[in-house]
Image (spheres, rainbow, N blue to C red):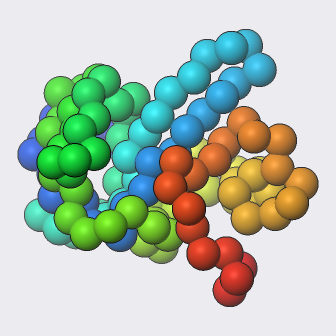
Amino acid sequence: MLFGLPRADIQLVDWNIICLNLPSGETGEFFIGYSLKDQLGRFSTPIVEYDDTNCFGKTQSGSVYTLIGPPGHPCIDGMYVLDELFGKEHIQRELFSKKASGIVRFKYPVDTSSE
């Protein structure tokens, strides 16, 4: 079951940023990863502030993200949330195949050799 989570201060591990480039011209970036405090996979609201040097970001909902460790392949729980929001087949095609259209992509490289 998916549900919206309230504004929070989040420490995110096993994370990356999802970039959306919709055909309508709308774009957005979203944090995806695993929240240490509530032990849940997270897919954020749109990022409104991001400081990659200090590993810090804020989202449209007012949540504050502290990013722990390097970006890479997001945790399984975070990917589950993304699959449920956009459809697993669509996400697999966009993020892990050569048939990607560029609508959905990772901001930081992900090792897909095991996909």
The total number of labels drawn is: 0
Q: Nearer the viewer, residue 80 or 67?
A: 67
User: Which quadrant of the figure contains the N terminus?
Assistant: bottom left
Q: Is residue 68 left or right of residue 103?
A: left
Reply above or below: 83 against 60: below
Q: Is residue 97 above or below residue 61?
A: below
Q: Is residue 25 visible?
A: yes
Q: In this view, does 107 lie to the left or right of 7?
A: right
Q: Residue at x 38, y 46 (%)?
A: 31
Residue at figure coordinates x 80%, y 57% from the top left: 93
- For the C terminus, which image quadrant? bottom right
Q: Position of residue 82 (x, y in %)?
A: 54, 52
**Residue 7 drawn at (x, y percent):** 16, 35
Q: Give the quadrant of residue 49.
A: top left
| Residue depicted at 43% across the width and 56% down the height | 16
Residue drawn at 15 percent across, 39 percent down? 64
Question: What x and y, as percent, mark residue 89?
Answer: 78, 58
User: With respect to residue 66, does 110 lie above or below?
Assistant: below
